[in-house]
């Protein structure tokens, strides 16, 4: 069986409207958070919620993956924001990871 190739003109790294090189040439907090929200929606592995207060963004990723899920999600988020030179501040619960961005 032949493997389907990506449609002509679709950039490499495209996933449901997100690309590895966002328009504008750089990764931003806005599109990184949008990527996390879309990943939550389409993977059904965690739920995304966020709130902005006093210029800080607080994001909670709720899941049923246990302690290893916490570790995975923390490293996943760190890898995304590391590319922008940001270091989210994490706290976690049994079934949730919360991080803060300034």
Image (cartoon, helix red, strand yellow):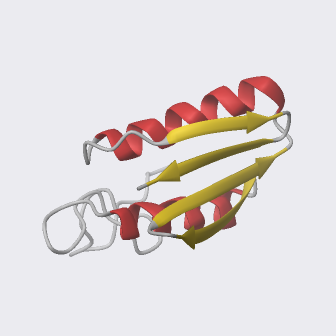
Rendered view: 34 above or below 44: below
Q: Work out which residue is located at the far left of the displayed protein and give it.
A: 25
Does 92 sit above or below residue 25? above
- The image quadrant of residue 27 is bottom left
Residue at 73% across / 32% down in the picture? 69
Q: Nearer the viewer, residue 4 or 46?
A: 46
Q: Nearer the viewer, residue 40 or 59?
A: 59
Q: Residue at x 58, y 47 (%)?
A: 99
Q: Is residue 45 visible?
A: no
- Vertical placement of 89 versus 29: above or below? above
Q: Is residue 59 left or right of residue 87?
A: right
The quadrant holding residue 14 is: bottom left
Q: Residue lying farthest front?
A: 54
Q: Is residue 21 visible?
A: yes
x and y percent of residue 3 in the render? 44, 52
Where's residue 34, x and y in %?
48, 69
Quarter of the image containing the C terminus?
bottom left
Q: Disc count in the image?
A: 0
Q: Residue at x 45, y 53 (%)?
A: 101
Which percent across, then down, holds residue 26?
18, 61
Q: Locate residue 83, reporting x and y percent.
A: 27, 43
Q: Residue at x 44, y 52 (%)?
A: 2
């Amino acid at each position: 069986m032949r493997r389907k190739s990506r449609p002509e003109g679709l950039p490499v790294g495209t996933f449901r409207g997100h690309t590895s090189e966002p328009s504008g040439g750089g990764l931003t907090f806005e599109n990184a958070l949008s990527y996390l929200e879309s990943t939550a929606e389409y993977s059904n592995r965690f739920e995304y919620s966020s709130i902005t207060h006093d210029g800080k963004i607080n994001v909670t990723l709720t899941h049923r993956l246990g302690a290893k899920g916490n570790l995975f999600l923390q490293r996943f988020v760190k890898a995304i924001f590391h590319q922008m030179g940001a270091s989210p501040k994490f706290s976690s619960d049994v079934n949730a990871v919360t991080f803060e961005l300034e």
